[in-house]
């Protein structure tokens, strides 16, 4: 564990970023896990980028064995631009730079059959899932009209997304959710899942949750992905939910990538 304090960091033309002693410790970290506490303005993104560059140029790590995770598409683009300035276009493009959801999609493209899909699956956003909820939810009372209310449909969407982020099943939602309509919401979830499978689709939460399920239950797949990405860096680690943190654990292993690999995460 280390802490980064706010510091003035500048890039010199044709050179890498100037780093403080604390930042250089992160860049030079060898095997295993490292947690970096870094507040706003402390240069954590620059430090993680310099670490990736250092793994390649100083330690001879193949760019293909490095995974850099961020939380937004914009952040991935920024990190890629910084990497390109440090190590060139070809090497930067060989590093896997992705959001957690993009990483999950990449994993599931190779193992979609395990979840009743093909590699050409679609990805549904919240509006798509809400439409499925409204279409799928029916009231068993034939005298009722309109299925469920718009409020309950939105509640169902939120409860299902929350459950997937916690790696719950529909059965667990029935037991542990606090919502008064949890029984109906669990039934809606099961119906929506059937319809998404029939449509060859996942939603965004599925991308992470199902990747966790795959890497938990399939030892060979877990071994392949751990060998593929020996070194992992994560920016804005404080934003990870349970599913994302578990996905990291499956990828890095109990020793944080050691021996011969590493996991470095930085957050406020």
Image (cartoon, rainbow, N blue to C red):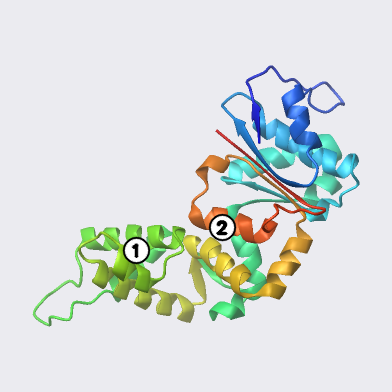
Question: Front-most of 33 and 240?
Answer: 33
Q: Which of marks 2 and 1 is nearer the N terminus?
A: 1
In the image, 73: left or right of 138?
Answer: right
Asked if one can make out residue 4 in the rendered structure from this viewpoint, the answer is: yes
Q: Name the residue under label 2.
A: 246
Determine the secondary structure under disc 1.
helix
In the image, 4: left or right of 230?
Answer: left
Determine the secondary structure under disc 2.
helix
Q: Where is residue 145 in the image (x, y as percent from the top left)?
A: 13, 74
On residue 130, which mark appears?
1
Q: Position of residue 148 (x, y in %)?
A: 20, 68
The reply to whether dot 2 and dot 1 touch (C-beta < 8 Å) is no
Asked if one can make out residue 82 in the rendered structure from this viewpoint, the answer is: no
Query: Who's the residue at 52% across and 64% down the image?
Result: 209
- Distance (Cα) linking label 2 and label 1: 26 Å
Q: In which quarter of the image is the C terminus?
A: top right
Residues packed near mark 1 inside 10 Å, few (<14), some (14 to 19) or many (20 plus): many
Q: Quadrant of the N terminus?
A: top right
In the image, 41: left or right of 154?
Answer: right
Q: In which quarter of the image is residue 244?
A: bottom right
């Amino acid at each position: 564990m280390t802490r980064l304090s706010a510091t003035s960091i500048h890039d010199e033309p044709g050179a890498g970023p100037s780093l403080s002693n604390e930042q250089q410790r992160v860049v030079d970290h060898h095997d295993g896990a490292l947690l970096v506490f870094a507040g706003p303005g402390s240069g954590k993104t620059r430090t993680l980028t310099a670490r990736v560059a250092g793994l390649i140029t100083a330690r001879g790590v193949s760019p293909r064995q490095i995974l850099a995770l961020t939380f937004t598409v914009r952040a991935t683009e920024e990190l890629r631009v910084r990497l390109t300035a440090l190590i060139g276009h070809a090497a930067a493009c060989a590093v896997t730079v992705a959001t957690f959801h993009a990483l999950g999609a990449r994993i599931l493209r190779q193992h979609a059959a395990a979840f009743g899909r093909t590699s050409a699956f679609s990805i549904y956003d919240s509006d798509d899932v809400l439409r499925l909820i409204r279409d799928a939810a029916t009231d068993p009372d034939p005298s009722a009209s309109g299925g469920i209310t718009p409020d309950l449909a939105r509640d169902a969407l939120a409860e299902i997304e929350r459950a997937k982020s916690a790696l719950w099943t529909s059965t667990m939602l029935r037991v542990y959710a606090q919502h008064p309509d949890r029984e109906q919401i669990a039934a809606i979830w099961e119906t929506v899942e059937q319809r998404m499978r029939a449509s060859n689709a996942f939603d965004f939460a599925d991308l992470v949750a199902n990747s966790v399920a795959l890497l938990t239950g399939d030892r060979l797949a877990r071994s392949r992905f751990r060998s593929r990405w020996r070194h992992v860096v994560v920016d804005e680690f404080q934003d990870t939910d349970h599913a994302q943190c578990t996905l990291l654990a499956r990828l890095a292993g109990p020793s944080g990538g050691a021996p011969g690999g590493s996991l470095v995460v930085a957050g406020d």
